[in-house]
Image (tube, coloured by chain):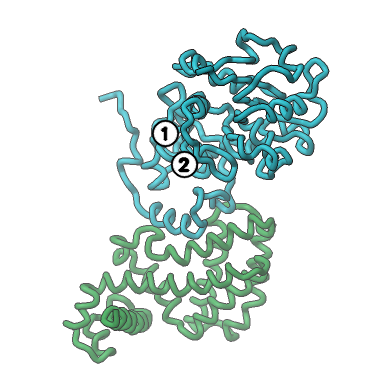
């Protein structure tokens, strides 16, 4: 058991190091030896954990989806209104973009920009299912309670996540005049206004 | 050995369950094991007037149709009172069809006062307390003829019938109508049908099919020996459920595209996870027509 835990922990440390390098330097400019050096291990040893850079890239998107999905799941489990949940989801998304910018950057700058890497094994929603599932639960609960308007899933999803992704992108470009967390209230209000029944 | 005495008593009903049972291929053979005291459409030893006296013999009582305590009279006799009279006499009571079990279609006319015999939709009625130990629920609109023959012949042969909390035989209702559906491959890969009556596609996602959360064995024991609603490309209407009838039966109720009801016993989170994964793949076989006639 201890051996498995140790291997799991090592894999996670590789994922976290690679996540940073990929999101800062880009997928193609980052090599396995770069990641290994950062972790003070040999490239050969790293291949024992991930047999290719593409496989590592796919594991990273699953990892980030799980982290975000777990955070939204916590919000979904709260006994609060959809309006309050929206504010919390926007808050946690922007907080992660501040504290762990590589998580969001990876999605925007690696996952979406290098679809050829993810075509085989990450088709459709396959590698982001935990994140998507929690958003579906959020929308479903909101419509069931009568608080949100019933509409096509993707029209609501695009409005919500496109908006948040766009803001984080602007932050990354350094064009936002204020700290991103200063926008939480306004953006949550805008999203709620667009989605409410 | 004398034959068990069978009394078929109707309250307010459309006769659907009577006609359904007429379609049983072994109809006469099954009835030959019983002394038919009274039947609404067949000639029997006792007339309806005899039955209304409350005096005719009865071992197995089939209750058919929905009940209201007052106002459902035949020749001046309240059918609810008559049902109570024969329920005390009978050794076994079968509530046949969704109306007799939960209230069903007829309940819609007067939802506050019309119900099934032991259940008012999912709520227990006062009869449940008194008769639960001899009642067997056979909901369905109509009930499948072989569901009734399974119960009658089990009673005749004194074979135990395990029941669930709604007094339904587990043999018939422990599975859902989804079990055995010939469209299961399409359900697995989340591919909806492009129209009613087509051989291809599942009816769950857009076309209102309630089979994955409806208790029943319609796809285990085919109707008319050969078919079922879903087999021919019509959605299951959930007719065996206490919630029957719902509205808009040909359209799946969704919340932002997400089915509001998911398969029985499966959490929405688990269902959506599996769905998201399955939808991510394009399976060529399931995009094509099953049969091509122009080669």
The hue used for chain A is green
The front one of B48 and A50 is B48
Name the residue at 48% across, 42% down.
Answer: B174
Chain identity of mark 2: B
Name the residue at 76% across, 17% down.
Answer: B53
Q: Which residue is mark 2?
A: B175
Query: Of helix, strand and loop, which one carries label 2?
Result: loop
Q: Give the image location of residue B285, x and y in percent.
A: 30, 41
Q: Give the image location of residue A158, x and y in percent.
A: 53, 61
Residue contact between numbered discs 1 and 2, judged by CB atoms under 8 Å: yes
Query: Which chain's colour is cyan?
Result: B
Name the residue at 59% across, 42% down.
Answer: B166
Query: Of helix, strand and loop, which one carries label 1?
Result: loop
| Image height of B58 relative to A166, above or below | above
For residue B172, side relative to residue A120 (left or right): right
Q: Which residue is mark 1?
A: B220
The front one of A149 and B110 is B110
Name the residue at 64% across, 60% down.
Answer: A195
For residue B3, side relative to residue A106 (left or right): right
Q: Give the image location of residue B4, x and y in percent.
A: 56, 21
Q: Which mark is residue B182?
A: none
């Amino acid at each position: 058991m201890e051996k498995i835990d140790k291997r799991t922990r090592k894999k996670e440390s590789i994922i976290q190091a690679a996540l940073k390098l990929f999101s800062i330097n880009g997928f193609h400019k980052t090599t396995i030896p770069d990641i290994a050096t950062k972790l003070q291990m040999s490239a050969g040893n790293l291949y024992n954990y991930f047999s290719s850079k593409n496989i590592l890239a796919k594991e990273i998107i699953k990892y980030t989806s799980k982290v975000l999905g777990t955070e939204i799941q916590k919000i979904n489990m709260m006994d609060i209104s959809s309006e309050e949940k929206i504010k919390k989801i926007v808050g946690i998304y922007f907080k992660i973009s501040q504290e762990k910018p590589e998580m969001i950057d990876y999605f925007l700058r690696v996952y979406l920009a290098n679809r050829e890497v993810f075509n085989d094994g990450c088709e459709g929603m396959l590698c982001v299912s935990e994140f998507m599932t929690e958003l579906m639960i959020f929308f479903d609960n909101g419509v069931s309670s009568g608080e949100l308007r019933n509409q096509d899933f993707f029209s609501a999803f695009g409005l919500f996540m496109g908006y948040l992704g766009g803001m984080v992108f602007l932050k990354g470009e350094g064009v936002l005049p204020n700290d991103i967390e200063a926008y939480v209230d306004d953006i949550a209000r805008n999203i709620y206004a667009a989605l409410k029944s | 050995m004398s034959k068990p005495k069978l009394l078929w008593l109707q309250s307010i009903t459309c006769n659907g369950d009577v006609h359904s049972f007429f379609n049983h291929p072994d109809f006469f053979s099954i009835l030959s094991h019983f002394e038919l005291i009274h039947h609404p459409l067949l000639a029997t030893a006792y007339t309806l007037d005899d039955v209304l006296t409350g005096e005719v013999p009865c071992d197995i009582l089939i209750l058919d149709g929905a009940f209201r305590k007052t106002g459902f009279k035949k020749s001046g006799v309240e059918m609810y009172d008559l049902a109570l009279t024969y329920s005390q006499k009978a050794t076994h009571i079968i509530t046949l069809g969704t109306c007799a079990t939960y209230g069903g279609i007829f309940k819609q006319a007067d939802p506050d006062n019309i119900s099934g015999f032991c259940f008012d939709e999912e709520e227990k009625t006062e009869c449940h307390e008194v008769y639960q130990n001899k009642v067997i629920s056979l909901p369905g609109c109509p009930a499948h003829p072989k569901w009734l023959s399974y119960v009658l012949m089990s009673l005749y042969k004194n074979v135990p019938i395990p029941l669930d909390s709604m007094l339904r035989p587990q043999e018939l209702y422990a599975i859902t109508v989804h079990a055995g559906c010939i469209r299961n491959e399409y359900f697995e890969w989340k591919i909806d049908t492009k129209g009613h009556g087509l051989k291809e596609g599942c009816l769950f996602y857009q076309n209102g099919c309630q089979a994955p959360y409806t208790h029943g064995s319609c796809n285990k024991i085919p109707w008319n020996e050969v078919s079922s609603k879903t087999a021919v490309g019509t959605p299951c209407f959930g007719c065996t459920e206490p919630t029957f009838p719902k509205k808009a039966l040909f359209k799946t109720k969704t919340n932002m595209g997400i089915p509001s009801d998911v398969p029985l016993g499966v959490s929405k989170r688990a269902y959506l996870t599996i769905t998201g994964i399955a939808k991510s793949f394009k399976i060529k076989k399931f995009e094509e027509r099953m049969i091509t006639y122009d080669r």
